[in-house]
Structure formats: C-alpha cells, structure tokens
Amino acid sequence: MRLSLGKEVMRLMVVGLYVFLYAPIGYIIYVAFQQDSVWPFPPSFTLEHFDSLMALDIYHVGLLNSLIIGSGTGVLATLLATAAVIGVLRYRVPGRALAAVFFLSPLFIAHVLIGIATLMFNRTILGLPGHIAAAILANATYATAFAFLVVLAQLARYDWRYDEAAMVFGATPVRTFFHVTLPLIWPAMLGAFIVSFLLAFNNLEISFYNLGATPTLPTLAWGKLRHGISEELYALAALLNLTVFALLGVFYLLLRSGLLKIEFRD
C-alpha cells in the first residue's frame, strides 16, 4: 500500500514538473493563434499575427543573422571542445586538470561581462568592429564550455587503445582520427554542436555588445519589448518553439526507427 502510494506521489510530482516547465510555452503558442492576446478566452483562432510577422522583412534578416551566428558558433565551439577533451583525456601531462578548469570557467561568468570583455578584446586587439564575425567569436567563448562538458561525458568512456592499435598497423594520426575516433565520438560532437548552436542562436547579452547595428531575433525581440508586447512576438515565439519540438520529434523518430543510433561504450 505504501509502495503504491509512493508511486502515485512520484507521478503527480512528475506531472507537476512538466506542467511547470511547459505551461508557459503552451500558453504562448495558444495566444499566438488568438485574436485577443490580452484575454484570449473564449478561443477565437486567427493567423493574423503570423501574417504580420511574415510581412516584416527585418525579422527575415534577423533570422538569417541568428542562423549564421548559431552555426558558426556551433562549428567553432565543437572543434575547440573536441580538441581540448582529447588533449585532456588522452595525454596524461601535468596541469591537464587546470586546463579543464580554464575551459569550464566561462560557465561562472555573467553574459554581460563576457560580452563587454570580448567587445574590448575584439576591437582593441583583433581590430574587429561590431559585426557577425565578432559575435561568433564572443559566443564561442561561452559555448565552448558547454560543448566541452558534452564531449567530455562521451569521451570519458572512450578506449584509446583503438587509436593505438590503428597506428600500430600503420595509420597516420589524421587517418586514425577520421576512420577510428570520429565514427565513435560523432554523437557527442553532434550534441555539442546542437547545444552550442542553441546557446548562440538565443543569446542576447553577448551578441548585443558585439553586433553593433546588426539585427538578430533576440535583439529584435528585446527592442520590441521596450515598447510593449506586440502580436508578432507571440507568433515569433510560437514558431521557434514549434520548430524545436518538431526537430526533437524527428530526432526521436530516427532513434526509434534505427536510422540513427547512439552507442555509449563502457
């Protein structure tokens, strides 16, 4: 009896957690399809908010810039994090723990400080004014720490004897990486890219200081919010959330169908 009661309590807690996490997202999606965004009850469905969003060219430009920043940051952070994790785990040299700490340190620094610091460094040292390249470098500073954790969780189980065996039989280090290491660790690299992409795509503080007048979706939304919540912001939030859920659904179906496999090795 006590065991059954405990299971019911756990189920209620899980349901309450999901409601707490997803109720605001569900409400935003619901409001995006309502004529009255102030009190959307009873329901009165419309697509006018989405038409208004599509008619504003500035959001198209912002979306493109956000995709470029997210993709560039994802690639750069994934490459840096993968190289760092391989160096830390494979080569047992003094100071490797300290090197790992340095890679993780951006996690404990406020976004505003990272944005200001990278702005001054890019402008003073690299001579980069505010534009997309500077924003990619700034976001990679922060995203690499998360990518490092994702790759580290996978490569901590990796057996480096595979690489040693390949090189014993004459494979070069480059060939060993592409034919032995990469096929085994690509799920971790994919996860690191996705996390880094989302962090940069949705980032406001770091990108804001390094973009100048270049618009992105977060900066456009922030600028609109200063004058109140407009209907196209509901539509924008709904589209972004629906896109994320659709991608997660496709990823889940690929896993269930066996077309995509992620193997974890002990």
Image (cartoon, rainbow, N blue to C red):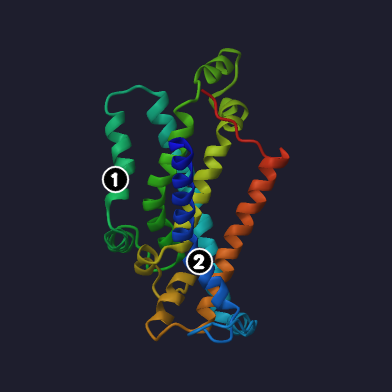
Q: Which image quadrant for residue 128?
A: bottom left
| 14 relative to 248 in the view: left or right | left
The three-letter code of the residue at mark 1 reads Ser
The residue pinned by badge 1 equals 105
Are the residues tagged 1 and 2 within 8 Å (C-beta)? no
Disc 2 secondary structure class: helix
Q: Could you say which disc has been placed on residue 25 in the image?
A: 2
- Where is residue 33? Give x, y as percent: 60, 78
Sequence-earlier tag: 1 or 2: 2
Crowding at label 2, few (<14), some or many (≥20) Cα neighbours within 10 Å? some
Q: Is residue 203 above or below residue 235?
A: above
In percent of the image, x 49 and y 71: which residue is there? 217
Crowding at label 1, few (<14), some or many (≥20) Cα neighbours within 10 Å? few
Who is closer to the viewer here, 239 or 150?
A: 239
Mark whose residue sits in front, 1 or 2:
2
Who is closer to the viewer here, 201 or 93?
A: 201
Q: Could you say which disc has been placed on residue 26 in the image?
A: none
The three-letter code of the residue at mark 2 reads Ile
Inspect this view and state whether residue 235 appears.
Answer: no
Disc 1 secondary structure class: helix
Q: Is residue 246 above or below residue 4?
A: below
Who is closer to the viewer here, 235 or 151?
A: 235
In percent of the image, x 29 and y 30: which residue is there? 97
- Where is residue 121? Give x, y as percent: 29, 58
Inspect this view and state whether residue 112 appears.
Answer: yes
Rounded to the nearest whole Å, what is the CA distance between mark 1 and mark 2?
A: 31 Å
- Where is residue 164? Give x, y as percent: 52, 16
